Image (cartoon, rainbow, N blue to C red):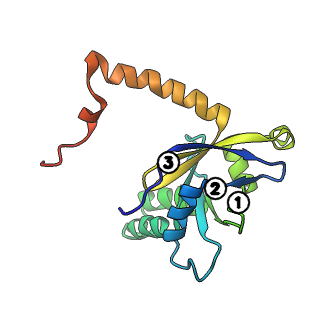
Amino acid sequence: MSESFRGELIQKVDNKARVSIPAAFRRVLETGDPSWPETPRPKVVMVYGDERRRFVECYSITEMKRVEALIARLPKGSPNRRLLERNLITLSATVEIDEDGRIVLPPRVREKIGVTTSDLTAGFEAVFAGTLETFQVWKRDVYDGEIADQSLAAVEELSGGLDMLALLPNPEA
């Protein structure tokens, strides 16, 4: 893995549902789009499937092709393949980044993260959360609540003062 998405960046969304992709994330999307720089508008795949999640998972073109290849290895018509196709392929949108580094959040993406008409009118903040090969887009208030809940769960998981790095697999195993 050469470049990855990392960090937690907060961006304002305007009343036309436009938001700037953080510059560091744009660089990863550019290098992860085989048609860039010949086609100067890199793309991002926004996956809004999986009703259990309150965020949208975003992939570079190259990373989504890797996932698609893994799905294609499964037997056609199998329950696992159908589930993955539906939630990762069908329930997604491919969006171009404009010359100003912005995208327009599609209606299904806005619906997924809980954006209302009044949110658009008033303007709201989106959180771009890096997760190595992908990044997530959240509505800020939902994200803040989720992070607080996860922090409490992590304290319980790491009870007894266990260092978080102990959760990593042993590189020699």
Reply above or below: 158 against 73. Answer: above
- Amino acid residing under circle 3: Gly
- Residue 108 shows in this picture: yes
Please rate how many residues cluster around mark 1, counting C-alpha atoms within 10 Å: few if below 14, some from 14 to 19, many from 20: some
Residue on which the image places disc 1: 102
Q: Which residue is found at the position 22% from the left and 43% from the top? A: 169
- Amino acid residing under circle 1: Arg
The tag on residue 21 is: 2
Q: Nearer the viewer, residue 164 or 112?
A: 164
Contact check, label 1 and label 2, Cβ < 8 Å: yes
Please rate how many residues cluster around mark 3, counting C-alpha atoms within 10 Å: few if below 14, some from 14 to 19, many from 20: some
- Amino acid residing under circle 2: Ile
Residue on which the image places disc 3: 130
Q: Nearer the viewer, residue 114 or 77?
A: 114
Q: CA–CA distance between discs 3 and 2?
A: 12 Å
Give coordinates of residue 124: x percent, y percent.
Answer: 76, 39
- Residue 32 shows in this picture: no
Element under label 3? Answer: strand
Give coordinates of residue 72: x percent, y percent.
Answer: 42, 70
Earlier residue among tags 1 and 2: 2
Earlier residue among tags 3 and 2: 2
Element under label 2? Answer: loop
